[in-house]
């Protein structure tokens, strides 16, 4: 493993470095995916890394009452876990970040890296999609925003063009009467990626019927996947265990999982139904407490 | 091209001229000769390489050396004072929390963070705190007891 290394101090400096390096350069944040990928020959070693994790603007977690949440791309999962008290409206995100890797990995690994690495099982992807995050991207042609659900194109493939940087994620504050939750299943509780993961967001009407539902599943398709038929089936309905089970069964019909060392496709399909049911029930319980 | 990195290792200023693609673990062990920090996997999985950087636990096998510029790195060698074992080290000995000893330096660094961040951790908090450290020998119970025995004490 050998490469040149540049530490960017500001976003404009990082942009200049990346543009000069062109396809010889690669962004590194925590490096927990990238270094392992290089060491194991998953990627060719780049000629140069541009480290964006020392840019103050990207390290910030901004929570504004009423205005929502702005997560800088290099905020670590550890920082998310330690911000528990200010993230009380975003439990799905905290539940995702706190189950990633181990305490040591979380101190290095960033939210932006988790998203840009675009693993189908990425811990925070379902939570951030269910919370309707917008991705903020800066590149040679300026700044743009895209809904996070449209950011993922396939395993390790995203909408980012050469020299573009994900600068952060923006989430509108979840309204009164809403709740969100995240569940994952893994062979071990620490240091292993998810077999299946699901996040749910629900918003209730005054009569406790579902007004808006967003369900996002991970590790059951090449990209994080919305369970749109389950979402639609719930709108206007009242919570019941039977209805949650039906939603789980509908979610399952979207899943196109693979079989690998961690689990068979069949098992993943069954479990995505179970986790959807659980995530919805938990999100509903939280929404009721927030009417 | 080599780069110069200046950081503090167990309180002592170090200036190293190294390839920036090297890891903190590698530089600590090979260039600076402190072999207490262990390399089990090199992949972030085992926690044998755990060190504290500005007081927080990291897998030194995953940290590129230029990232520690200006930072305070603490390894297992930084704990004993005047030839006296650190209270966490002594607690591990007293509780039989060490068998082969390979995981011990990393375990103790995680234990230090757990107790510094939260002087009275519950058993669950201790288990979560060492969830990034694998031990093949002890079954963890004695490690958890050793750390628990220090609740409320100065570490
Ligand atoms: C032991 C271990 C356990 C792990 N466990 C889990 C787990 O349980 N769940 C899980 O989801 N992941 C896990 N991971 C994977 C990894 O830690 C996460 O995906 C992490 O969030 C990646 O962040 P990073 O900052 O380290 O990314 P990096 O490795 O720095 O970057 C990853 C990729 O994204 C690109 N990139 C990074 N930031 C940006 C940006 N802002 N803009 C554009 N491109 C960018 C890089 O070029 C690279 O291609 C684990 C890794 C290890 C080593
Ligand atoms: S050697 Fe670093 S975690 Fe195993
Ligand atoms: S004592 Fe042998 S690995 Fe823990």
Image (cartoon, rainbow, N blue to C red):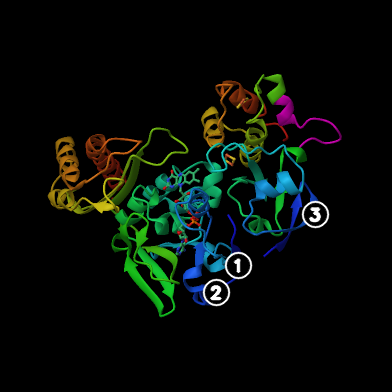
Q: Chain of mark 2?
A: A
Q: Which residues are magenta?
A: B79-91
**In the displayed structure image, the side of residue B147 where residue A208 appears, left or right:** left
Q: Tell me, yes or no, whether the highlighted magenta stretch contains residue B81.
A: yes
Both labels 2 and 3 in a single chain: no
Above-or-below relation of B75 to A93: above
**Residue B123, horizontal then vertical, whole percent:** 54, 28
Whether residues under marks 2 and 3 lie with C-beta atoms below 8 angstroms apart, the answer is no
Residues at marks 2 and 3, CA–CA distance in whole angstroms? 30 Å
Residue B13: mark in rendering: 3
A161 and A226: which one is in front? A161
Q: Tell me, yes or no, whether the highlighted magenta stretch contains residue A231.
A: no
Q: Which residue is mark 2?
A: A17
A173 and A138: which one is in front? A138
Q: Is residue A160 visible?
A: yes
Q: Badge 2: how crowded within 10 Å, few (<14), some, or many (20+)?
A: many
* Residue extending farthest bottom: A141
Above-or-below relation of B6 to B87: below
Above-or-below relation of A190 to B138: below
Secondary-structure class at tag 3? strand
Ligand 3 quadrant in view: top right
Q: Badge 3: how crowded within 10 Å, few (<14), some, or many (20+)?
A: few
**Residue A41, horizontal then vertical, whole percent:** 48, 51
Chain-order first, disc 2 or disc 1? 1
Residues at marks 3 and 1, CA–CA distance in whole angstroms? 23 Å
Q: Chain of mark 3?
A: B
Where, quadrant-wise, is the N terminus of chain B in this rendering?
A: bottom right
**Residue A15, horizontal then vertical, whole percent:** 51, 75
Q: Nearer the viewer, mark 3 or mark 1?
A: 1
Where, quadrant-wise, is the C terminus of chain B in this rendering?
A: top right
């Amino acid at each position: 493993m050998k490469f040149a290394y540049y530490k960017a101090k500001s976003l404009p400096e990082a942009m200049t470095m990346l543009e000069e390096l062109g396809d010889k350069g690669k962004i590194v944040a925590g490096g927990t995916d990238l270094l392992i990928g290089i060491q194991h020959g998953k990627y060719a070693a780049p000629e140069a890394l541009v480290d964006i994790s020392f840019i103050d603007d990207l390290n910030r977690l901004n929570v504004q009452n009423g205005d929502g949440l702005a997560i800088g791309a290099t905020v670590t999962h550890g920082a998310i876990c330690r911000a528990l008290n200010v993230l009380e409206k975003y439990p799905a995100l905290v539940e995702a970040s706190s189950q990633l890797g181990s305490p040591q990995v979380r101190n290095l690994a960033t939210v932006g890296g988790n998203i840009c690495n675009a693993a189908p099982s990425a811990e925070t992807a379902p939570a951030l999609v269910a919370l309707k995050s917008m991705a903020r991207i800066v590149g040679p042609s300026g700044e743009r925003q895209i809904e996070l659900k449209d950011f993922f194109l396939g395993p390790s493939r995203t909408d980012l063009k050469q020299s573009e940087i994900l600068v952060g994620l923006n989430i509108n504050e979840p309204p009164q009467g809403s709740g969100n939750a995240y569940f994952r299943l893994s062979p071990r509780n620490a240091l292993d990626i998810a077999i299946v993961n699901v996040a749910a967001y629900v918003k209730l009407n005054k009569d406790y019927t579902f007004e808006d539902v967003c369900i996002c599943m991970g590790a059951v398709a090449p990209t994080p996947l919305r369970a749109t038929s389950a979402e639609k089936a719930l709108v206007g309905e009242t919570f019941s265990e039977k209805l949650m089970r039906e939603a789980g069964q509908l979610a399952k019909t979207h899943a196109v999982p693979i079989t690998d060392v961690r689990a068979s496709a069949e098992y993943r399909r069954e479990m995505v139904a179970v986790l959807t049911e659980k995530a919805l029930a938990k999100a509903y319980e939280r929404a009721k407490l927030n009417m | 091209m080599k780069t110069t990195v200046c950081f503090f290792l167990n309180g002592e200023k170090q200036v190293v001229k190294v390839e920036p693609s090297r890891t903190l673990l590698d530089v600590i062990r090979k260039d600076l000769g402190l072999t207490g920090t262990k390399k089990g996997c090199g992949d972030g999985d085992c926690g044998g390489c755990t060190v504290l950087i500005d007081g927080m636990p990291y897998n030194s096998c995953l940290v590129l050396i230029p990232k520690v510029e200006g930072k305070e790195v603490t390894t297992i060698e930084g704990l004993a004072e005047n030839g006296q074992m650190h209270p966490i080290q002594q607690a591990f000995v007293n509780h039989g929390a060490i068998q082969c000893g390979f995981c011990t330096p990393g375990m103790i660094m995680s234990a230090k963070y757990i107790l510094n961040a939260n002087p009275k951790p519950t058993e669950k908090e201790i288990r979560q705190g060492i969830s990034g450290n694998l031990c093949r020998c002890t079954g963890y119970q004695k490690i958890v007891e050793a750390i628990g025995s220090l609740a409320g004490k100065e570490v």
